[in-house]
Image (cartoon, helix red, strand yellow):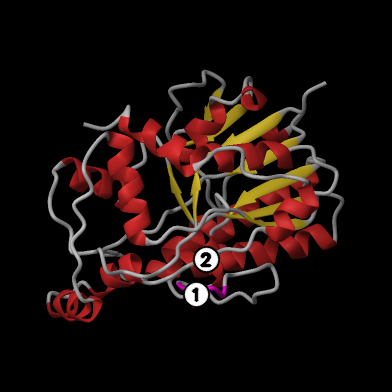
Amino acid sequence: MAPKILLTGGSGFLGSALLNHPSFYGALTIGRTPPAQSKNFIAISLDPFSDYSHILSGIDIVVHVAARVHVMNEEAEDSLSEYRNINTLGTLNLAEQAINSGIKRFIFISSIKVLGEQTEKGQPFTNSNLLNPQDAYSMSKAEAETGLLKLAKKSNMEVVIIRPPLVYGKGVKGNFDKLLKLTAGQFPLPLGSINNKRSLVSIENLVDLICICLEHLKAGNQTFLVSDDCDLSTPDLLTLIARGGGYKSRLVKFPTVLLSIMLFCIGKSAIYQRLCGSMQVDIAHTKNQLNWSPPHTPESTIVNCWSHEI
């Protein structure tokens, strides 16, 4: 018999994709916004104070996707407290009540950012890296991870932590969507000289891994890094995006030092890091522990992105 699943964050990008997977048909979803794909929804705030005891009754597995996501131009006076309230304290409140309700497994979607913002090219993050969060969002996620592992040690509930890098796919917003629009606009992009490597994960591969972790015997009390297992440079990614949409790649060779200076002068140094820096993930532990490999290629996912775009 299939396990009964409680999903948080079902209206978001990842949550919506999970609800379209057969493993989540019939899952109960909770949060503030009802998902379009599910009528089995209960509106409740995900915070440090909500009582979920009546909701958790009869549930086998909690998949906790909901979070206060990274905000580029944070305006809250105490942003760390805002993130902690939802991502740390809210998560631990739900987990503690899950333990009291006899939940078997709690799957937490964290972020690779708990290990840092970048890596040296060819020196990927691994499971042996210590936590090194650099901003309020990643600090709140790291603190949630630490708290969950402590709860797991003193209870019978298994905790599974998944740390994705940038997630992309059909309907994604944010930076990846901006790259699609720039490509469609056929603007010359001065990014042809960038020599970096970045790990990404398609929404299809992330959903596949989460579904594997629902019941895999070796997933309990483990932390998994995830990616497409196919690291790309920024020019490689832009070339794939152009090809997937049937466009000509318009990359122009331009000195990265000058690009750095230009972006610094207009207060956009963070953009330079995202475009030119490396951030690689080694998923050997995930593949070995779960006997899993990413089933979808970046090419297939990127082509699918264009069916939603323009």
Q: Position of residue 6 (x, y in %)?
A: 65, 33
**Residue 135 in view (yes/no):** yes
Going by the image, does 94 lie left or right of 269?
right
Amino acid type of the residue that numbered disc 2 sits on in the rendered structure:
Gln
Q: Where is residue 238 in the image (x, y as percent from the top left)?
A: 31, 51
Residue beneath the point at 55% across and 27% down:
19
> Considering the numbered disc 2 on the image, is that residue within a helix, a strand or a loop?
loop
Q: Give the magenta range.
A: 118-123
Near-viewer residue (99 or 125): 125
156 up-or-down from 104: above or below: below
Q: Residues within 10 Å of mark 1 (few under 14, many from 20)?
A: some
The tag on residue 280 is: 2
User: What residue is shown with label 1?
Assistant: 119
Q: How crowded is mark 2: few (under 14 residues within 10 Å), some or many (20 or more)?
A: many
140 up-or-down from 201: above or below: below
> Considering the numbered disc 1 on the image, is that residue within a helix, a strand or a loop?
loop
